[in-house]
Image: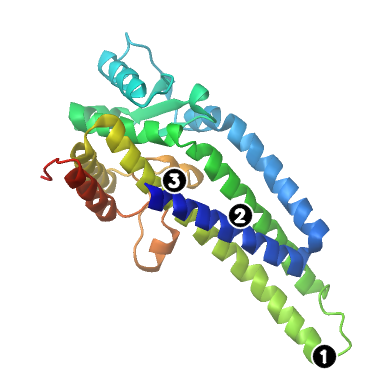
């Protein structure tokens, strides 16, 4: 758990340093502040209304105990284990088994599961999944992802400034042609490379938070191997029956609906299922739980 928290802080620091570097090299202090303010306003709105936006996007319907007693009782019991207020519970009308959590803080948390996950997982496996989602709420991952997105967004704005500056010669004021050419190339290089690096760091934070949510979720549910089995089932089912989600919200699901290999692993929002299962097996062993 400490390692994943350390990784998150390390990546956040790295992202901040990258922002400060290109801000000073390209946009100057005022340009960097403007970019940060613009990105901050956009992501603040997203943070504040993210639950309503994403739940509506997937047609999620809020339920009560009478609508789905099994699910509602499970969420309520696990929320008590996690020492959290019981979040609102939603069902998404989709056969693809998946789930996500949202909400700007534990008092405004929401857990959404698809109809497909209700039909395919056992009680213990579903408990593992719900525990994982409650862990995201407990760890305030929506807030962390918003901070990361704000810094990455500011870097993207500065990169756009650099592109226009390179096109119109804003950074080539030296009287020496070679200096102007070097300035143009370095500016263009930063404009292209910086957003890619920011995205890679942003996704690394996302993967680190998924590992942490698996660990904390396993503690909440007390079912590390049931969560591992659920991840395998969900991974296989999502390949057979893809959901076709909005790409901007794919990182929210417990199993990424997006696939890719090779170089695309750098741009994964989630660790591979094999990595997650391996870590859950290690955790289960420390708890005296047999891996099966």
Task: Count how many numbered circles sit on residues in the image.
Answer: 3
For label 1, the SS is helix
In the image: residue 275, left or right of residue 32: left
Q: Quadrant of residue 173?
A: bottom right
Say which label, 1 or 2, has the lower sequence index.
2
In the image: residue 104, left or right of residue 259: right
Toward the top, the furthest residue is: 66
Q: Quadrant of residue 53?
A: top right
Distance from the alpha carbon under mark 3 to that under mark 1: 46 Å
Residue at the (27%, 30%) spot, across then down: 221
Say which label, 3 or 2, has the lower sequence index.
2
Say which label, 3 or 1, has the lower sequence index.
1
For label 2, the SS is helix
Q: Where is residue 277 shown, x and y percent of the image?
A: 23, 49
Q: Where is residue 70 shown, x and y percent of the image?
A: 25, 17
Residue 152, labelled with which disc?
2
Which residue carries the number 3 mark?
251
Which residue carries the number 1 mark?
177
């Amino acid at each position: 758990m400490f390692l994943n928290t350390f990784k998150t802080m390390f990546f956040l620091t790295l992202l901040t340093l990258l922002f400060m570097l290109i801000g000073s090299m390209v946009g100057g202090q005022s340009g960097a502040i403007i970019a940060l303010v613009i990105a901050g306003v956009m992501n603040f709105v997203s943070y504040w209304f993210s639950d309503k936006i994403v739940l509506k996007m997937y047609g999620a319907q809020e339920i009560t105990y009478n609508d789905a007693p099994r699910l509602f009782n499970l969420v309520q019991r696990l929320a008590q284990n996690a020492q959290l207020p019981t979040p609102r519970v939603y069902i998404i009308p989709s056969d693809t088994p998946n789930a996500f959590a949202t909400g700007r803080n534990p008092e405004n948390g929401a857990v959404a599961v698809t109809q497909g996950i209700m039909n395919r997982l056992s009680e213990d496996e579903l408990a593992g999944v719900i525990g994982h989602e409650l862990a995201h709420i407990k760890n305030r991952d929506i807030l962390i992802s918003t901070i990361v997105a704000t810094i990455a967004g500011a870097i993207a704005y500065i990169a756009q400034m650099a592109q226009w500056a390179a096109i119109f010669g804003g950074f080539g004021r030296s009287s020496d042609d070679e200096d102007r050419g070097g300035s143009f190339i370095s500016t263009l290089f930063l404009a292209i490379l910086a957003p890619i690096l920011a995205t890679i760091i942003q996704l690394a934070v996302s993967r680190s938070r998924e590992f942490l949510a698996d660990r904390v979720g396993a503690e909440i549910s007390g079912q590390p191997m049931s969560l591992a089995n659920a991840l395998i089932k969900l991974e296989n089912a999502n390949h057979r029956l893809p959901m076709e989600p909005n790409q901007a919200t794919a990182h929210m699901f417990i199993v990424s609906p997006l696939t890719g290999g090779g170089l695309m692993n750098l741009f994964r929002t989630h660790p591979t299922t094999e990595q997650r299962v391996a870590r859950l097996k290690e955790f289960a062993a420390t708890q005296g739980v047999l891996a099966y």
